[in-house]
Amino acid sequence: MSLDFGILNAGTTAKQIDPRKIFTTLKRHARFKRPLDEQADVLDAWFERRAAKDLTIKMNTGGGKTVVGLLSLQSSLNENVKPAVYITPDNFLVSQVIAEASDLGIAATDDEKDPDFLAGRSILVANIHKLINGRTVFGVGERKIPIGVVVIDDAHASLSSVNDQFCLKSKAGSPVYDGLLALFEEDLKAQSPTTLLDVKAEDPNAVLTVPYWAWQAHQDDVLGILHANRNGKELEWNWPLLSEAIPLCTCIFGGGRLEIAPRFLPIDRIPSFASAQRRIYMTATLADDTILVSHFQADPKEIAKPIRPKGGGDIGDRMILAPQEINPEYTVEEIKAMVSSIADDLNVVIIVPSKSRASFWKDVAHQILDKDNIQQGVEKLKNGHVGLSVLINKYDGIDLPGEACELLVIDGLPEVYGLSERSEMLLLDGTRKQLVRQIQRIEQGMGRGVRSSDDHCVVLLLGGKLTQRLHQPEAEDMFSAATRAQITLGKAVAEQVRGKSLADLEPILDLCLEQNDDWVQAGRNAVVNALPIEGGHLDGHQVKMREAFDAVRISRYDLAIDKAQEAVNSATDPQEKGFLKQQLAEITNFIDAAKAQELQLSALSLNSRLLKPIAGATYTKLNAPPSGQSSAAVAYMGKFLEGNDLIIWVNGLLDDLDWGEEGSKRFEAAMKDLGKFLGFGSQRPEDEVGRGPDNLWALGGLKYLVIECKSGAVQADKISKGDANQLNGSIVWFGEKYDKSCTATPIMVHPKTVFEHAASPHSDIRIVNSAGLKRLRDAVRAYSISLATSGGFKDPAEAAKQLSHHKLAATEIVGLCTVSQGAK
């Protein structure tokens, strides 16, 4: 006998929209017994607020974000909000999500033409590139495939791909690059003749921005060049997204390439996404939620209220330590040896920011992975013991669960991606905004080794500059609640082993590696009892500037200027205030060029690295501190509360004060800081006014050092004619700016001491070569340790004594670290 199921289901045919109730009705795999507590918390909160256009869901890695995303989409479909799209950062994760949906009992497809998707009976799973590109199947400027609800999973990992789509790129030798460089050559030269030469030489460190007034004035010429090449390989995928926004873009040259990109993304060029009824952003670690506003035009009012689980217990066990904070005298070579030894038995993963840093680990690495071989390398780690693996600039988008990674090392500060980001970071160096971005990348990296709540991993944060950044008081508040709790626990561990040898540290690491019961309990207590974070991290200045950008796009310059002015008025950090005021000037220039130049000059007075106005920047002469070298040095060290703080800062400084093509701008910045640290007057004239030497030190007694830094010339056989001419030009510059009572010693920082035959170096030039730089670094390190150990960094008399002893006094420093031309 058969049953009449129509009678049995009478009155129950309405589709369920509560995601937790949907879960109970699904024909799912046995591993899905019920939603985890964290999933239930989030699903309930999402369901209550589901009508909002933009919502952020923050869950720790391993907390079951995928299930939450799929249930939210299914709930929306059941409520007739359709079609539904699940977006991942890459193709690798598309197949994972489809498999998860299948196990969960939810229909999913990777075919956007699937009738079930279009009818709302199935969820489309695609990578971010399929949704956002200049030829997207969803339509550019028109809605080919509508979207009712969309989930952006791992939103932070998708940002670089989204950025790339809204950025026109061109390489030296192409019609676009060569045409625009010729068009703006005089404008670039007015900003910095030296940097323009570096750009032409395709120096990888050169970054030079076309002034906005020149960019706006030459729009017809710019559009002519771009339009003529719009179908070429360089522009074909991006041109459709940016063709209407070129006047609002910034053009930057550097390293043999150029980038043209807007400060905020005109995401409405993809109407399907812009008009979606519901947009859900899921992220594990997004310290700066503002990016959702700047990139996806999300509603800041909703983004300011992210949805989180009530507890933090959905993260695995991590012991997070900064060895050089435990004992600043640990060397990276010693830590490398310890890590390499551990890799004999366990999988160890090192994340480095660049290829040059990867070379440091090359002799102990079993595999070095970049974007071309990362997937194969990760699979090896998941399948068994490999040893020590190095990942180059890969802080997100990969999973290393269980034994795939039990010790993770973040070695050095993450590098920035493109020219636009690098330019912005130079302008905002040392500000909170820069720190937030770096913390975000670091937290993403730290999440690679713990992929579920029952996973574990030791995380070591390595490098002087990284330790220095994390030591800043405000850094800890930028991490997620669970990570912050684990960092705090790690600092409590560090206090108990402070000053001990590395041999004493290894048994401490074993507590986590071997999952000691007491350690596991302490870790769980720390996370469960972590103070919850209320609200999101939104930069109010950037929210206002986004509103200004959108107003300019519809020619509401009055509204745009008002919004930009509000951002400027609310900024307190001088560097950031100047940065925002330059953007205000850029908007103003559309309707009042004279007023814009006034604003630009005012902005420059707050941040000397900004664009130099048409009238140029006024140079301010440098004087030695009137209090004398040792008193000035002690005054500068007043920011250090303890000797340990001093040594951590110096280690970070010396990280930058080293040879290498990728760090020449950081080297120049470190030289400026070193001058002040030693009690001298210190400037970067070329950086600040576009003319003069890289560095200028005032030693006192009207004596100066005119310094050109060529720390990137590691491949050079000799000192080039161009480098010699640059220093010769700086000597002439000094003679023009300072009267005859002042004397200057010209100094070239270069690994070689012999000039090319064609060069005509000034006879007084002294050279800081490889041996000289080592003597300087060693002396600075010994000086700081002496003062930190004795507490003498607060005493001018003791500082004077140590300056003299280490030959860092004004009368001795040139002799300490320089040699004559041609010296061996």
Image: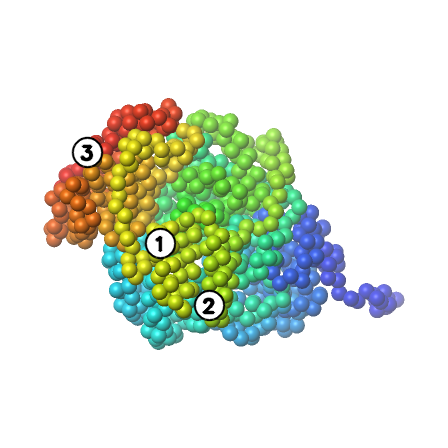
- The residue carrying mark 1 is 604
- Residue 659, given in percent of the width and then of the height, sits at 29, 43
Along the viewing direction, whichever of 143 and 632 lies nearer the viewer: 632
Residue at the image point whose x is 26% and y is 26% from the top: 805
| For residue 309, above or below residue 563 | above
Residue at the image point whose x is 17% and y is 37% from the top: 819
Position of 612 with respect to 60 (left or right) is left
Residue at the image point whose x is 57% and y is 51% from the top: 536
Q: Residues within 10 Å of mark 3 (few under 14, many from 20)?
A: few
Name the amino acid, label 2. Tyr
- Residue 379, given in percent of the width and then of the height, sits at 50, 51
The mark nearer the N terminus, 3 or 1, is 1
Position of 558 with respect to 603 (left or right) is right
Q: Residues within 10 Å of mark 2 (few under 14, many from 20)?
A: many
Name the amino acid, label 3. Gly
Q: Quadrant of residue 298?
A: bottom right
Q: Quadrant of residue 769?
A: top left
Along the viewing direction, whichever of 365 and 557 lies nearer the viewer: 557
Circle 3: element type: helix
On residue 815, which mark appears?
Answer: 3
On residue 557, which mark appears?
Answer: 2
Residue at the image point whose x is 61% and y is 47% from the top: 534
